[in-house]
């Protein structure tokens, strides 16, 4: 079961010292698995071909199937705003949380809509023990992220009555879940990212119990630069300028498995895909 991280409600992340146990586990996993066994499924590095022109997700899935072994997705902190009952509110037990379009609030919320450049997120959950070749059908993913202004619904001032940009999906026969959202902003101190938790079943997810994996998805810098040049992302331009994947307190020890493949445009919207070995 994933270790819970109950961080203060007024912090985005506590920083490197708080996450050292998680980072140490990740380094140990890499040492045990060996660099040659860690797949670059659905990912690119900053020095490789930009994610905006990377291979389709189908090609990535095919590549992972041929791997003799693969490492699980790195474990990360859920941050201070999970909304899963571990730090205050629990959106997972609310009727309506199982949905693909997470741009709008639901239930008894204020009914707001998150604005921003359209983004479709597809995660493919696969069995790491089988060499990433076997989809995890019937698992579930809870996904959440900040809005264009860098605020988290349920927690941040001004959006505590909203629950947008949060949702749960059950994986299909191919292990996939897809969410319709908006491109998240960049707030001070953290590289642009999306949080997600993997559960063994939809029943576990909606009961907020038995998490199997907690991790984060990162975005390529070139795509962030393009998106943040559009209306509404002004603060993100300033915040991103002082950050890098190499210095981020979550991704600095390695981000190859977490860097999404991103395609699209600001006018038509973007797609972000990532394979998640569990």
Image: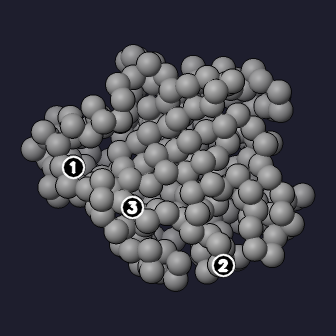
Question: Residue drawn at (43%, 65%), measured in percent from left and top?
Answer: 170
Of labels 2 and 1, the one closer to you: 2
As helix, strand or loop, the secondary structure at mark 2 comes to loop
Residues under numbered marks 2 and 1 in contact, where contact means CB atoms less than 8 Å apart? no
* CA–CA distance in space, label 2 to label 1: 32 Å
Location of residue 80 by image quarter: bottom right
Residue 278 in sight here: no
Question: What x and y, as percent, mark residue 157?
Answer: 87, 59
Protein image colouring:
one colour
Mark 3 lies on residue:
171
The 10 Å Cα crowd at callout 1, few under 14, some 14 to 19, many 20 or more, is many
Mark 3 or 1, closer to the camera: 3
Up-down relation of residue 264 to residue 153 (above or below): above
Residue picked out by circle 1: 132
Looking at the image, which residue sits at the far left?
Answer: 68
In which quarter of the view is residue 57 placed? top left
User: Disc 2 to disc 3, how far (Cα)?
Assistant: 20 Å
Quadrant occupied by the N terminus? bottom left
The circle drawn on residue 94 is 2
Give percent across and percent down for residue 117.
70, 34
- Please tell me how crowded label 2 is: few (under 14), some (14-19), or many (20+) other residues with Cα within 10 Å: few
Position above or below: 268 against 108: above
Where residue 55 sits, quadrant-wise, is top left
Mark 2 or 3, nearer chain start: 2
Give the structural element (helix, strand or loop) at label 1: loop
2 vs 204, nearest the viewer: 204
Per the model, the C-alpha gap separating discs 3 and 1 is: 15 Å
Asked whether 103 or 255 is in front, the reply is: 103
On the question of residue 161 being in view, the answer is yes
Quarter placement of the C terminus: bottom left
């Amino acid at each position: 079961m994933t270790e819970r991280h109950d961080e203060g409600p007024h912090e985005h992340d506590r920083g490197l010292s708080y996450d050292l146990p998680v980072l140490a586990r990740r380094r140990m996993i890499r040492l045990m698995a060996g660099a040659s066994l860690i797949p670059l499924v659905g990912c690119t590095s900053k020095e490789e071909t930009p994610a905006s022109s990377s291979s389709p997700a189908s090609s990535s899935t095919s590549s992972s199937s041929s791997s003799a072994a693969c490492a699980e997705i790195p474990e990360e902190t859920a941050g201070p705003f999970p909304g899963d009952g571990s730090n205050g509110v629990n959106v997972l037990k609310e009727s309506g949380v199982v949905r693909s379009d997470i741009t709008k609030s639901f239930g008894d919320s204020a009914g707001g809509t998150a604005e921003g450049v359209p983004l479709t997120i597809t995660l493919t959950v696969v069995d790491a023990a089988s060499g990433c070749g076997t989809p995890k059908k019937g698992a579930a993913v809870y996904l959440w992220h900040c809005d264009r202004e860098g605020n988290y619904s349920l927690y941040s001032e001004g959006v505590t009555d909203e629950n947008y940009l949060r949702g749960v999906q059950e994986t299909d026969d191919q292990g996939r879940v897809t969410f319709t959202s908006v491109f998240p902003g960049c707030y001070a101190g953290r590289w642009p990212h999306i949080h997600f938790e993997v559960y063994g079943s939809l029943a576990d997810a909606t009961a907020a119990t038995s998490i199997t994996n907690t991790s984060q998805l990162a975005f390529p810098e070139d795509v962030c630069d393009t998106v943040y040049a559009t209306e509404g992302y002004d603060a993100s331009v300033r915040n991103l300028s002082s950050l890098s994947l190499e210095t981020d307190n979550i991704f600095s020890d390695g981000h190859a498995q977490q860097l999404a493949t991103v395609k699209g445009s600001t006018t038509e919207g973007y797609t972000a895909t990532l394979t998640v070995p569990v």
